[in-house]
Image (spheres, rainbow, N blue to C red):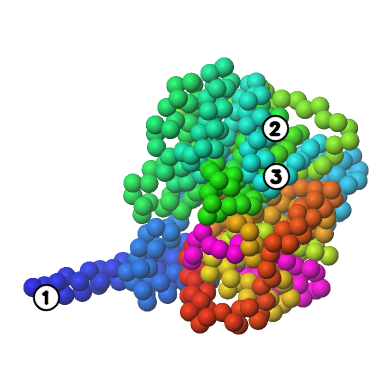
Amino acid sequence: MIDIIGFVSDFFLQIIFLINICFAITVVFIERKSPTATIAWLMALLFAPVLGFFLYLIFGQSFYRKRMFSIKKEADEVLTNLIESQKRDLFTAEVPVKKTVPDNYRRMMFMLMESSRAPVTTENEVRIFTDGNEKYKALLEAIRSAKDHIHMEYYILKDDEIGNEVFAALTERAKTGVEVRFLGDGLGCAGTKKRFYHSYLEAGGKLAFFFPSLLNITHPRINYRNHRKIAVIDGKVGFVGGFNIGDDYVSRIPAWAPWRDTAVMVTGHAVLTMQIRFFLDWNYAAKKDTLDFSSRYFPEHSPSPDLWLPVQVVSGGPDTYWNPIKEAYLKLITLATDSVYIQTPYFIPDESIMDALRMAALSGIDVRIMMPCKPDHWFVYWAGYSYIRQLLDAGVRAYTYDTGFIHAKTIVVDRVAASVGSANWDVRSFRLNFETNVIMYDHQIASELKSIFERDLLVCTELTRERFAALPRKIQIKQSVSRLFSPLL
């Protein structure tokens, strides 16, 4: 009996090894991942064959994502004409940003038009939220005052107090005839049962999910999640940021409270570009209930003549040829002349981000990174600390946020420009997830975000080389192993 079990086990391992060789050939010659990721996958597939086999089935497959997103890419072309017009006019005297934005940042605007089809809007007003209760108070007020339509897409929706409060408000507006649509992610919203949506659907609310079928976890679509958090009300008010819909995001879960995140509420022309993003995502996911680009969804704005805040809504994902979110982060770092302040819950950068941060610090720029003091994902947590440790040698300063959990995804540069959105500073947000950030080229907004960072420092502890050296050997091993496999994710 033991001999039979041993034979079956050996046979199984041989089959796995042969399949892994096929996977390895695919990684090298077909998928053409980055060299770092390729080496990591080869090590996992050939030296830890069983673990590598299952990791690749769940996280590694990407060789037909081009086919998966071909329809979505065609829909994205609707922005092309507007972008080409703005690119021609960006550096002329007639363009308002000519007076308010330095030339090198206008070059960044041009780059994001090319890589993300992100038009520049100039007549905007922005309000920053760092507390979930304040953010959801403003969102609920906007929902309850909606007259024509409400469009929302969120990565996570939970059946809890705030989730029920939001959907009660959506249901109430749907009953009055307001057109309400909610787009959730199939994985992020998987824990919310169908009965949660009954009243909402009966009231006329519309619902769709991005890649909802997860019965087979080896399906490659598990890798491509809609991580965006966008709400658009009547085409006039928009919300973008890091808050999902759940009690932890409004500091009602003691283990994570107080929850520290960042989001923005925008009024002005930038809302129309958020609307376009929702349209493209909804039409891809809903299929049978597609939206047309009717003027009712894109109302005329009459802003105050004093509002000239330039904003670009930048989106990226596996359907984009370039990596616009990562490139926006990179460009902001390279434009810095005084300071770069970053907040992120997860920090697994690629070599280009590491090099940019290192060179900025070595150039005398004040580079600071703030991360949580406790993990919600152990593997990512330890990997992030290993990257931080390497940057300290170049003069980068890093901090742990010691009160609750920090989930903000922000960068502010020189009190000149800043980004707030859904994209973490990790390879998953750069390459695999669908993300949306708002880039704001404004002294007042950048100064406010920098002041918020400095206020957060009051409840932080600085990470130093001495602190790392004093860590137990077991923790240092965890960091090294986690970093070794971080390119796989």
12 part of magenta stretch? no
**Going by the image, does 57 lie left or right of 365?**
left
Residue position marked by numbered label 2 in the rendering: 237
For mark 2, does the 10 Å Cα neighbourhood hold few (<14), some (14 to 19), or many (20 or more) residues? many
359 part of magenta stretch? yes
| Residue 351 rendering spot, x and y as whole percentages | 62, 70
Tag 3 near tag 2, CB within 8 Å? no
Q: Amino acid at mark 2?
A: Val
The mark nearer the N terminus, 3 or 1, is 1
Secondary-structure class at tag 3: strand
Q: Amino acid at mark 3?
A: Phe
Which of the pair 85/396 is nearer the observer?
396
The mark nearer the N terminus, 1 or 2, is 1
| Residue in the image at 63% along x and 38% along y | 136
Residue position marked by numbered label 3 in the rendering: 129
Please identify the residue farthest to the left as the structure is shown.
Answer: 1
- What residue range appears in magenta? 350-379
Measure the C-alpha gap from mark 3 to mark 2.
15 Å
Look at the picture and state if 183 lies above or below 355. above
**Going by the image, does 360 lie left or right of 185?**
right
Which of the pair 100/73 is nearer the observer?
100
Measure the C-alpha gap from mark 3 to mark 1.
63 Å
Q: Amino acid at mark 1?
A: Ile
Measure the C-alpha gap from mark 1 to mark 2.
68 Å
Viewer can see residue 82: no
Q: Which mark is residue 2?
A: 1
